[in-house]
Structures are given as C-alpha cells and as structure tokens.
Image (cartoon, coloured by chain):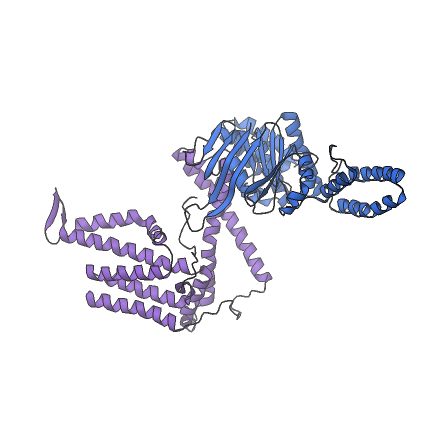
Chain colours: A blue, B purple
Amino acid sequence: MSVIFEEVSYEYDKGTPFRQPALNGVNLHIEPGSFTAIAGPTGCGKSTLLQLFGGLLDPTAGSVKVFDTVLKAGAKTPKLRELRRRTGLVFQFPEHQLFEETVEKDLCFGPLNFGLPAEEAKRRAGAALRQVGLPEELLGRSPFHLSGGQMRKAAIASVLAMEPDLLVLDEPGASLDPASRTELTELLLRLCREQGKTVVVVTHRIEELLPYADRWVLMKDGSCLFQGTAEAMAEQLPMLEKEGLQLPECMHWWHWLAGHFGLGGERPVFSAAGLAELTAKLLEQAGAGAGAEEAASLSVPAVQAITAVQAAGGARL
Amino acid sequence: MKNRLLIGRVIDTGSWVHALDPRAKLTAMLVYAAAIILLRSWPALLLAALFSLAVMAATRISYKFYAKAAKPLRLLMLFIFILQCLTVSQGRVLLQAGPLAVSAGGLSAGGLAVVRMALFISFTALLTFTTTPGRLNQGLDGMLKPFARLRLPVHRLTLMAGLALRFIPTILEESQKILKAQAARGADLRELRLRDKGKMLISLLVPVTVGAFRRAEELVTSMEARGFVVDAPRTEYYEPSWGAKETGFVGLHLLLLAAVLWLL
C-alpha cells in the first residue's frame, strides 16, 4: 500500500474557539501504481486530505501511513524527508507554490533539496518543463510573470522534477484550457501506467477522469461517502445523489439505460459517443422486438439525454 | 501554525459588551490604561483586578483566552520582575547573594509591575475580542474626527490602519502557504539546520513581498470597481450609536480611575 488512512480526523485551530473540524474518521487505502480521483463539493475536506498525504498537517485523530512513514495523532512527528522525497504535492493555487526568482531555480529546488547534483537537477528541470508542454525559454523568467495557466504547468513541472513515486494533485485542471487539461490527464495517465507512479487527483470535473481513474473517492462534509470503481459509483448513483453529490450527466444516462434495459452486469459506458451508439443499438433492438410504440416513447428522453451528455462536454472515447 | 495570533480575532459570544459602540470601548480602554499606569499600591491593584475580572465575565468569553492573550509576553514579564526585584531596595532584605539582594520592597514592586502588565494586556485584549477590525477602525475614525478640523487626513489614516490590520493575517497565511510548498519539496523548517533555517526565512521575503503588492493592487482595483473614492462622503453599513449603555460603560471605567487615584 502506498497510502493508508485509518480513522483520520483533522481539526483546524484545535483547542481554540476558532476550531474547525475538516475531516472526520476517514479511512483510505491507495494501492501503488493506481490512479485515484477524489471529488466532492467545495469545503468537504479534499485539500486538507491532500495536505495530510504530504505530511504537511499532523492528523488530530487516527493515523496516516505514507510509504514507510507513519503520522499518528498525538505521537511525535517522525522525520519526513523520505516521505517528501517520494511524494509530490501540487497545490490548489500554483501561485502559492512558486517562490524562487526564476522558473529554473524553482524547478531545481526540490531535486537540490534531496541531494541531487546541480547538473542533474537542471537536466530534470528542462525535462519536466517539456513534459508539461512549456517552452524551455521560460526557464530564465520569473515565475510571477507567467500567465495563470503557465504558472499551473510550472508548478506541476516543479513537482515532476522531483520524480516522486506518489503524485498528488489538487485540481490540476483549474485555470487550464480544455486542450491542456486533456494533455495533462494523458501525461498523468502515462506516468501512472508506464512508470508505475501512484497518482491521486482532486477534480471537480468527474466526467473528464471517468474513463481513466481506477478508483473514486467521493467526499462530503469531511467524510468519505464512497470509495470504489466508476462502475460501482454508477450503481449507487441514487444514494449518492440523495446525499447531495452532483454526478455527471453521462452517469445518469448510463444508470437509466442500465435500469431500463437490464444492463446490470455489463461494463458501463460513460463517453458521449459511446452512450449515443449504445442507445441507438438498444433502441434498434427494442424497435425490432417490442414494436414501434415503445421505441417512440424511448426516443424522446434519449435525444434529450444525448444532447445533455454532449452539452456537459462528456468524456471522449 | 498551531498557536496562531490570538490578537485581532473576534470571539463572538453576543454579549452586551460586543454590541457597544466602538468609540465607548476605545474611550474606556484609554481610561483603563490611565488607571493601570497610575496605580501604585496593592489595594488599588486588587480593586483593578476585581474590576477587570467582572468586565471580562460580562463579555462571556472564557478567562482562558484572556490569559492566552498575555502569554506571548511572559518572558518580558519575568524579565521585568527580576529587574524590579534586584534594583528596588526597600525594607527588609530577604535574600542576599554577593552584590545582589532582594528586599521586601523589591519583591512587592516586581510583583506589582508584573500583575499590572498582565492585567493591562489581557484586559485590553477585550477590545479586539469583542470588536471586529472594521468597527474598531470606524470607532477610531469617529474619535479622531475633531482632528479633521486641523486638516489632518483622518479618513485616509484610518483607512490605511484598517487595511494594514486586515493584511496581517493574510500575509501570515501567505507565508505559511509558501513554507508548506517548500516543506513539500523537502525543505521543512522543522528539520533544517539553523543556518539553512535562516536562509529559508530570507527566501520567503521576496515571494511574500511580491504577493503583498499583488494583493494590494487587486484590492485597490476591486475597491475602485465598486465605486470607492478616497475622501468622498460615504454612508456606513454600521451606524454606531451612543446610548445609556455606552455612557455607563465609560462611567464605570472613570469610577475605577477615581478609585485608583483615591487609593493611590
């Protein structure tokens, strides 16, 4: 296991009148080499959760184990160097993450801290910048003069340069255009599948990661509401919606199709194109079997749903 | 930061002290300060202490937080105590070690100084515990109004003071975030050697300053976008009003001052 959370709670300003509970008995297991996506409404404790991954906060109850380092509530904080070397954390606001005078220095900061020679650090800096699709001319610039999207990419590169085993990203797609978001998702997927890195991503766009993430963690009010695959998530859709979570249109449509045509055990389809094809096929079968009346009654919601899926920008195949 | 600055944070319990006109609270604090500075004897101190505890109780904020407000200055208080003990020589000598002597008078003076200081700091924390910075600023503005006749730019000064106060927690938070970003990439302040620690803190200066300027600019833009013009007359969201409670609150403090002067 890369990361194990056991009954972890976290409270800000504990013991003062400003105390604010943020996490509540969270249990979490993350397998090495897996791609996990975390979603939930704002203020549900996602960012707090991620900071616990990086050993930036000590749990106020329970224990967090990241690789071989264990942070236990009440116990003395262990040496965190090893944890930090193997964990790359990309914060929600990249402008809080860049602090050096030039982009190159910022990218080298991590590798140098972990004792790499300057030459190697610079090589990694260049490589990381190329990986996120930024031109190398930016190396000499001040990170504060980058645009929002470039800053975001530079912040991601500064973590990639450390070559961590566990990559934790807090809404990495925010402030990026759709093309860059797709590129980023592909990069993360490559790092996960080809280099065996463990990836954890917080996202507000569930539909964009639906085809890729191995596991989903849905949070609400500091607790884990759901943990499992996208398939299981689609099955439990009514329960999750009742809890007030907003799930993408394409899941609704799949859920409806699965319920109506009895697709229970099958592998779900979440892409717009895939759903459209499947719907057409099912309608054709239904039309051939039961007569035109039922097909006609189906076709209206079908058309509505397909346009809804497309409007929601549903994931590509 | 585990023990974040307690000063400047409001603890809202909804007591009548919270609702007082900020001008009344400011005036009362000034009177209180005068009383504390003037008092010289234990009976007067006892009276002031009882008075303070009673007013603190009226705010319905736990004494614990008042004590916490004075805590950061405990070393200074210790220092003052020792200094007073060793330099004031009056009455019987209680302890003698070489050239250093502690007399009964010194002990009394030291104790008096420390209790006064502790009282003063924890009691005046009441002001920030019960009043939001905005209202405090408004109160200040109201109290400085007479100086506007002398062409003192009162509004500008209080606006500046208000913004500066407002920025303290923001800048602290910002540095905290950068420290976290550095820690996440292997430079944890807690685990660094002293020399590297210094370097690390200096490296904070640039991004925090840059961040502060950026924020200030954004603030100006957002204020102007919402029609703020310096020195233009504007209505207040909260209209302070002086009533019997305000007069009573200030009156109580004046009584304390009179009693302290009488017991002097």
Q: Quadrant of residue A278?
A: top right
Q: Is residue A17 above or below residue A35?
A: below
Q: B43 and A234: which one is in front?
A: A234
- A290 relative position to A224: left or right: right
Q: Is B30 rendered above or below residue A99?
A: below
Of all residues shown, which one is farthest toward the front?
A290
- The number of callouts visible is 0
Q: Indicate the quadrant containing the C terminus of chain A: top left, top right, bottom left or bottom right.
A: top right
Q: Position of residue A306 (x, y in %)?
A: 79, 44
Q: Quadrant of residue B8?
A: bottom left
Residue shown at the point (40%, 69%) measured from the top left: B143
Counting from the top left corner in percent of width and height, residue A197 is at 61, 28
Residue A298 location (% of width, % of height)? 83, 45
Give whichever of B18, B24 is nearer the camera: B18
Q: For this rendering, which residue is in front, A212 or A115?
A: A212
Point out the image quarter for the N terminus of chain A: top right
- Does residue B41 appear in the picture of this structure? no
List x then y, in percent, for residue A85: 52, 29
Return the residue found at the far left. B92
Can see residue A169?
yes
B149 above or below A251? below
